[in-house]
Amino acid sequence: MFDQAVSRRQFLGLAGGLAAFAGLGLAGCGNSASTGTSAGSAAGSAAASSLSGDITYEGASSFQALVEAAAEKFMDENPDVSITGSGNGSGKGLTAVSEGTVQIGNSDVFAETKLDADAAAKLVDHEVAVVGMGPVVSKNVKVDDLSLEQLKGIFSGQITNWKDLGGDDAKIVVFNRKAGSGTRATFEAAVFGTEKNEFKGDAELDKSGDVATNMGSTDNAISYLDFSHFDDSKFTAVKVEGVEPKSENVFDNKFPIWATEHMYCAKDADDVTKAFLDYMLSKDVQGKLVEKQGFIPVSEMKVAKDANGKVTEKK
């Protein structure tokens, strides 16, 4: 799980802090104006007597647990609201919300990287958290630090034995994510840059939970996970370029693999969907659930990424 060493918590207003984070209009879906994170909290409680309806979501499995936890609290405050969904990958989530089959599409990547420009322009982005992602190895693997070049060799199929990395003489078992996964897209963007990679590995897995399960039961394996799925009892998270996978190292981009967690909706989303997305940016979620679930509040990041994943200084 995330390292919790940083105690400073400054929750910027949505119109100022989050818009500055990515240079995007991050107010509520449609034409609703944002009134800041504290107002988002009120959306869940003050409207409890009037909100009703069904919300469905699809998308990234990396922060599905966070969305589920927030949904449970929101439904407790709004008993006439039902929120259900699945975590089958960022690509599926973005396609589903674009086609109108769900109200919310969850993604580890910007919509522009998965949808055509016209489809992406019809969606509204809500950045709800930031998470680091990094390589994990089986408990029996003795290698505890890998360079980006070494990761490139492993995940392109060029390096196939742990002995070539200072470990035991054993075949490297590579667990990859399936195409369409935002976690995979984030990992490959950091490792391969713009180079195309066709290597599938020994298995392509659907979800972060599947990776965690397989890593916990397989020797000599390697994969990658978001920090919120790290489990020291099952596998080992390794350093990248000598930098430990911890939250404070993500803040300044010292740890090179991280993503913003997005929740997209249509511009004409209904009131209950808008209220839930406002709630995701409230103090109730940003100040409690986000960190509890192993993520970083979006307002705390010192750097940002543009739509193509390029790191820029946060204004």
Image (cartoon, grey):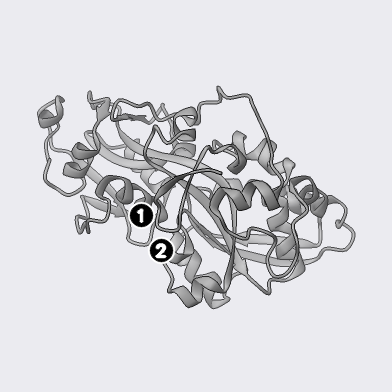
Classify the position of the C terminus by image quarter.
Answer: top right
Q: Which of 92/311 is in front?
A: 311
Q: Position of residue 68 (x, y in %)?
A: 62, 50
Q: CA distance from mark 2 to mark 1?
A: 9 Å
Secondary structure beneath dot 1 equals helix
Q: Which residue position holds label 2?
A: 113
Instruction: Tell me whether circle 2 and circle 1 mark residues in contact (CB < 8 Å).
Output: yes
Q: Amino acid at mark 2?
A: Thr
Q: Nearer the viewer, mark 2 or mark 1?
A: 2
Instruction: List the single residue furthest toward the front.
Output: 315
Query: In this rendering, is residue 258 above or below 266?
Result: above
Q: Position of residue 49 (x, y in %)?
A: 90, 59
State whether residue 149 is above or below residue 57. Answer: above
- Count how many numbered circles sit on residues in the image: 2
Q: Quadrant of residue 114?
A: bottom left
Q: Which residue is mark 1?
A: 185
Q: Residues within 10 Å of mark 1 (few under 14, many from 20)?
A: many
**Point 12% across, 40% down: residue:** 160
Q: Quadrant of residue 112?
A: bottom left
Question: Residue type at mark 1?
Answer: Ala
Picture coordinates of residue 5 (x, y %)? 55, 22
| First reached walking from the N terminus: tag 2 or tag 1 | 2
Seen at 83% across and 63% down, the residue is 51
- Whether 71 is drawn above or below 125: the answer is above
| Residue 18: mark in rendering | none
Q: In this orientation, which residue lies closer to the viewer: 52 or 290?
A: 290
x, y percentage for residue 141?
Answer: 23, 27
Q: Image point 81% across, 56% down: which residue?
A: 78
Q: Nearer the viewer, residue 125 or 42?
A: 125
**Left or right for 39, reference 26:** right
Q: Secondary structure at mark 2?
A: helix
